[in-house]
Image (tube, rainbow, N blue to C red):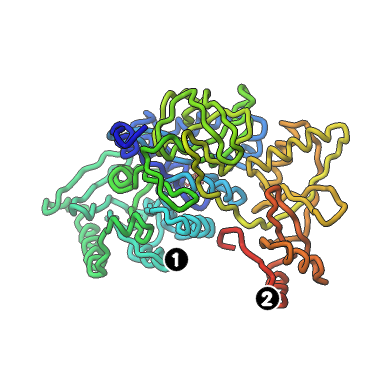
């Protein structure tokens, strides 16, 4: 494959691979459905959730998800609109699964921060925003739930600017106060888009466009006048959209709407089409960007077992970074040096699988794997290439996990290995002690619940977990580990399968005290806003 492959470059240019990041309840599921509705991918809103629900109900380990009413698994939604292919990577809602979100963010080219108009920036939005920012991902913000009482628009702009510490540029501006929302002014051409409510929000909302200078309805005139005044204040601030600043993650375009009432969804979709970056050259671990028309290379960002009980298999989600994927192609795994055939590659739509024959940079494939593929692996053809490792979050919860049935020791070990590879939890050991009981580490206790359930249903291993008293951890080296273990305070050291040593402490206060007393000891955060 050479630079003379115009189809490949064109296909990469029409991809928009993005995620929506938000705090639970901000409306991510609703917005996702409405984007699909507006793109024409579904005829009626609600069908995706229904499909997801039905499939999830048949899967054993997803019972946790069902019971808790949360989304545990990341899936990929692909839809086409106006000759643009959108790959929307779903991110789990609960904080205990934020590490999954981290991996998803390694696979996207941009992200939408979804904000509840009444609640503003919430803790999880903040954490994910920091991660996205650290990766330099271009971000846009959508202020949702404008149909009900919340902050006034100028107040929201101030709030977001203060919380996110980045300039925000409104592309649309709401007409009418939250709760009496009439429509938006599109700042690019000063037109007024007046929305009409659709019962239940299941169909595209009727939108009347009043061009700049045309007469405004008497009923809308007062609200429209207020919006105009507010926009003058925004204009005085000089907040102009700057594509370069947006693409380098230094400026956030802002839109207003209501996912439930289908207000502002068309504008968001058009904005994603117009300004969200397409699949661009990805930086490899030697720091050089790899042009999209180089031979095939993809990043595995998620590995999941038994997604569908009818298949009982493992699926690796890979993001194509360069080249064309063709079904049946043999690729090399950069970590193991082994080759594998991508014979069963699927496009994943919710839980439904469609066999894919080809895919282009920006696309995400679910590849069924028999061999050893882990999160962070690079699969390639031609000369060796590796993408940088995906960062992990610093764990904050720890439990010991012991096998209750000695006859099932093999299953227990295999299960733990699988969960570790998938990154469901981190499996740690205490190398310095005779105690062989493995330790599970995660961001929150719900991860352990999923792990225990999967050990039971998929591996038939009956396990017992016991909470450990550690709430803070830092990466350290051999010297640091020795110092930590010698400390009279309550500390310990665990080792990950990749050799990373983690010093653990009962809480942050004790950890900080230890760090003060031992200034030369290496103590590093993995990543995240802890
Ligand atoms: P999530 O995936 O981010 O967790 O949020 P989800 O879409 O499930 O939405 C959370 C709740 O917020 C839902 O209400 C949903 O209907 C509501 N919601 C989403 N967007 C809007 C909006 O623009 N305006 C208003 N007023 N509400 C919105 P629920 O009561 O939990 O469920 P449901 O019975 O409405 O489905």
Mark before the other along the chain sequence, 2 or 1 = 1
Q: Position of residue 195 (x, y in %)?
A: 27, 45
Residue identified by numbered label 2: 519
Q: Is residue 500 above or below residue 267?
A: below
- The C terminus is located in which quarter? bottom right
Can you see residue 200?
no
Q: Position of residue 350 (x, y in %)?
A: 49, 32
Q: Position of residue 105 (x, y in %)?
A: 48, 48
Residue identified by numbered label 1: 163
Q: Quadrant of residue 522?
A: bottom right
Distance from the alpha carbon under mark 2 to that under mark 1: 32 Å
Badge 1 element: helix
Residue extending farthest to the bottom is 517
* Count of marks placed on residues: 2
- The N terminus is located in which quarter? top left
In percent of the image, x 50 and y 56: which residue is there?
A: 131
In percent of the image, x 30 and y 48: which residue is there?
A: 275
């Amino acid at each position: 494959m050479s630079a003379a492959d115009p189809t490949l470059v064109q296909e990469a240019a029409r991809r928009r691979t993005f995620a929506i990041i938000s705090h639970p309840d901000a409306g991510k599921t609703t917005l996702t459905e409405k984007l699909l509705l507006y793109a024409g991918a579904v005829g009626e809103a609600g069908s995706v959730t229904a499909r997801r629900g039905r499939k999830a109900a048949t899967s054993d380990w997803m019972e946790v998800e069902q019971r808790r009413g949360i989304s545990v698994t990341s899936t990929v939604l692909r839809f086409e609109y106006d000759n643009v292919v959108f790959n929307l990577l779903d991110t789990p809602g609960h904080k205990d699964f934020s590490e999954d979100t981290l991996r998803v963010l390694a696979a996207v080219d941009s992200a939408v921060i979804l904000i509840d108009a009444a609640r503003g920036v919430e803790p999880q939005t903040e954490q994910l925003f920091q991660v996205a920012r650290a990766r330099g991902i271009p971000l846009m913000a959508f202020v949702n739930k404008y149909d009900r009482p919340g902050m006034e628009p100028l107040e929201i702009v101030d709030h977001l600017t203060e919380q996110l510490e980045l300039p925000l540029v409104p592309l649309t501006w709401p007409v009418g106060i939250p709760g009496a929302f009439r429509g938006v002014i599109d700042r690019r051409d000063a037109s007024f888009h007046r929305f009409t409510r659709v019962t239940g929000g299941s169909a595209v909302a009727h939108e009347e466009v009043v061009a700049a200078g045309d007469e405004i309805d008497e009923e809308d005139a007062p609200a429209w006048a207020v919006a105009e005044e507010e926009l003058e204040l925004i204009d005085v601030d000089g907040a102009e959209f700057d594509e370069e600043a947006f693409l380098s993650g230094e400026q956030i375009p802002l839109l207003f709407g209501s996912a439930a009432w289908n207000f502002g969804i068309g504008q968001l979709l058009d904005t994603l089409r117009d300004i969200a970056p397409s699949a661009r050259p990805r930086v490899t671990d030697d720091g050089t960007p790899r042009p999209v028309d180089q031979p095939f290379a993809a990043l595995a960002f998620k590995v999941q077992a038994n997604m569908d009980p009818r298949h009982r298999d493992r699926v690796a989600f890979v993001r194509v970074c360069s080249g064309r994927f063709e079904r049946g192609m043999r690729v090399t795994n950069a970590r193991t040096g082994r080759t594998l055939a991508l014979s069963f590659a699927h496009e994943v739509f919710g839980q439904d699988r469609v066999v894919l024959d080809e895919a282009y940079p920006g696309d995400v494939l679910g590849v069924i794997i028999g061999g050893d593929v882990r999160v962070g692996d690079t699969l390639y053809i031609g000369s060796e290439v590796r993408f940088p490792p995906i960062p992990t979050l610093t764990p904050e919860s720890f439990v010991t996990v012991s096998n209750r049935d000695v006859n099932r020791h093999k299953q227990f070990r295999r299960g733990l290995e699988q969960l570790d590879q998938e990154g469901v939890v981190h499996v740690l050991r205490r190398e310095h002690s005779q105690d062989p009981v493995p330790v599970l580490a995660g961001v929150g206790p719900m991860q352990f619940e999923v792990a225990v359930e999967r050990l039971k249903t998929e591996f038939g291993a009956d396990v017992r977990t016991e909470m450990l008293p550690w709430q803070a951890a830092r990466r350290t080296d051999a010297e640091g580990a020795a110092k930590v273990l010698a400390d009279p305070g309550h500390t310990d050291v665990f080792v990950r399968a990749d050799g990373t040593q983690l010093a653990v402490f009962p809480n942050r206060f004790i950890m900080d005290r230890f760090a003060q007393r031992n200034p030369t000891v290496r103590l590093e955060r993995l990543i995240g806003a802890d």
